[in-house]
Amino acid sequence: MWLVGDIGGTKTILALYEAEGNDWQCRKTARYASADYHQFSELLTLFLADVSAPIDAVCIGIAGPVINGDCITTNLPWVIKHKEIGRQTGTDKVWLLNDLEASAWGLLALPETDFVELNSSAKHQSDGNKAVVAAGTGLGEALMICYGDDYRIIATEGGHADFAPGDRQQIGLLDYLMDKLDGHVSYERVLSGSGLHAIYGYLKQSQFALELPDTALRIQKEDPAAVIGMLGVAGSDPLCVEALKIFCRIYGAEAGNLALKCLPYSGIYLTGGIAAKILPALQKGEFITSFINKGRSSSVIETISVKVCMNQEVGLHGALNFLQNRLAGQAH
């Protein structure tokens, strides 16, 4: 039995897989609100309470940097240690991956039907690099470097790089966020759920449009980013529509920045909790226009495929794929 997981700032998904012939079948899966638990060990104890079968291997993708096999999560007060998980599960085969590293492994295992192309000028190259960008509770990025017939997956903390505004409106947004955050503004502060809410707040403060009373009430009672994203896609609230446009422009610009750094001619992929939910907005063209808008280097990336991953369990699939590759020949 293999235990795989995907730990994010908002939710944690755990699953148990068992070999059945040449395939792997999910025997148990559960979702948890991450913030409801003081440490991951509490959540894992709950998940394993009714599990009697021995666990042979563990792989978990985590939103945060993994250093020497352990992780201090970025948007949760958790310290996750691979040896502690080994003690809880009874196996020394424990791997913790950065969540984007896990997503990259997942992309290699998913069918093409799980993706939607954003770049109508895309020309696919089968033996090129790939890259992953994921906006959700935070912003993650990973590189997939082509190495013969395989890929070397490199986790990064690129989401914490300095935010660079692309126009005067975004300069105003940067000033607004610098005042709010008392200093450093990263891309994650803009390209995340809280970032979309911050863009909305900036537009409201700068009097781009009046805030609708019903929207204000919903933002107070519900997840602000979900409300803004939904109303922005629907086109029913001017502030939400503009906030989503700015979000898409900046998302495209940062995806383009990553493309320039690793030249992913086999594609750049958008995962995370936001992209699939705002797909109609991403398809309107502002994302891809900003992606390509790199001055003298626009022609270098203008034909790179940019795909939205619609499978929201890509990290879980990635953890399983990692174990299948790592333990090849030992799976049974």
Image (cartoon, rainbow, N blue to C red):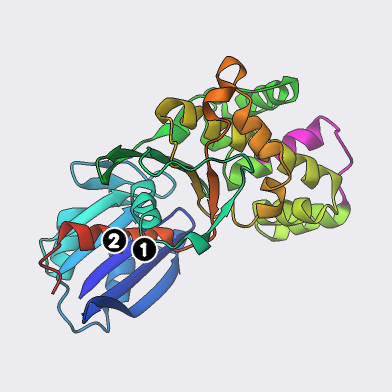
What are the residue bounds of the magenta stretch?
198-212
Would residue 194 appear left or right of 270 to someone viewing this image?
A: right
Residue 162, given in percent of the width and then of the height, sits at 50, 24
Q: Which residue is mark 2?
A: 321
Would residue 41 appear left or right of 205 to someone viewing this image?
A: left
Residue 143, given in percent of the width and then of the height, sits at 37, 38
Q: CA distance from mark 2 to mark 1?
A: 6 Å
Q: For the residue marked with disc 1, what is the amino acid?
A: His
Under circle 2, the secondary element is helix
Crowding at dot 2, Cα within 10 Å, few <14 / some 14-19 / many 20+, comes out as many
Q: Are marks 2 and 1 in contact (CB under 8 Å)?
A: yes
Crowding at dot 1, Cα within 10 Å, few <14 / some 14-19 / many 20+, comes out as many
Q: Is residue 116 above or below residue 17?
A: above
Q: Which mark is residue 75?
A: none
Q: For the residue marked with disc 2, what is the amino acid?
A: Asn
Q: Which mark is residue 317?
A: 1
Q: Can see residue 222?
A: yes
Instruction: Tell whether position 209 is magenta.
Output: yes
Residue 61, given in percent of the width and then of the height, sits at 33, 54
